[in-house]
Image: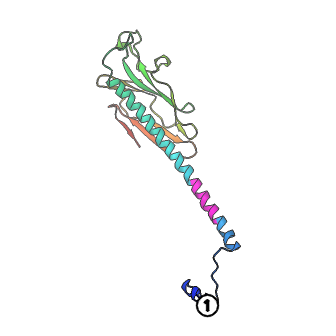
Amino acid sequence: MSLTLLNKRAGLLPGMESNRGFTIVEILVMIPIIAILASILIIYNRTTEGQLILFKEQARLVSTLNRAKGLALALFKETAGETICAYGVKIFPAPLSSYTIFKDLPNDGVDCSSADNQYSPNENFDKMVEVDKRAVKIDPAFTTLDVVVFIPPDPQIILNGDPSETNEQKITLKLKDNNNSKVIKVNKAGQISIE
């Protein structure tokens, strides 16, 4: 086959030859374009990573609240030598940004009517759970829930240690590097909702 026939098949005009490589100028133009696209991808990936961490922490906190509620619903008898009146979750806003499940014990050791419906360090049921402090904090400015207690068998819900509290309380998880946040709400009926 002649060179002219190959050029016609490749769609080249007469007098143009088919080069099968890139020129140095084309390569030098493509390198900055690829670098710009890669930097955009890295920035987008870091933003997405922060959102994923925020969603994960929100799911862990909702799971902890539901676990405390489930423990209270399952509480129908006294355990080996210890009277447990209720289970609850204590929220520690930033700088600690952590939370824990606790068991509410009677103050006199026997009668649940003497329970204070508050967190005490000696009543820890589970280890302290810290949010991922690299990216997320429990925002004290927008968090109104300090402690929630689930008293069996209904369960009766006590928000912030006040049995007469009827307003919905919230926990706000916030990304440290921007204003993205997630809100978890708990109402007097024990319904846990997310925003």
Residue 180's spot in the image, x, y percent? 51, 46
Q: 35 above or below 73?
A: below
Q: Secondary structure at mark 1?
A: loop
**In magenta stretch: residue 34:** yes
Tell me which secondary structure the magenta stretch mostly adopts. helix
Look at 41% across and 25% down and name the residue there: 88
Q: Amino acid at mark 1?
A: Pro
**Of residues 19 and 192, which is closer to you in this image?**
19
Residue 180 in sight: no
Q: Which portion, as a residue range, is magenta?
A: 33-43
Label 1, on which residue? 14
Q: How many marks?
A: 1
| Position of 31 relative to 144 (above/below) | below
**Dot 1 surroundings within 10 Å: few (below 14), some, or many (20 or more)?**
few
Q: Quadrant of the C terminus?
A: top left
177 sits to left or right of 69 = right
- Extreme-right residue of the structure: 24
Dividing the picture into quarters, in which one does residue 151 lie?
Answer: top left
Q: Quadrant of the N terminus?
A: bottom right
Identity of the residue drawn at 54% across and 39% down: 136
Q: Nearer the viewer, residue 28 or 15?
A: 15
As rendered, which of 97 and 8 lies closer to the eye? 8
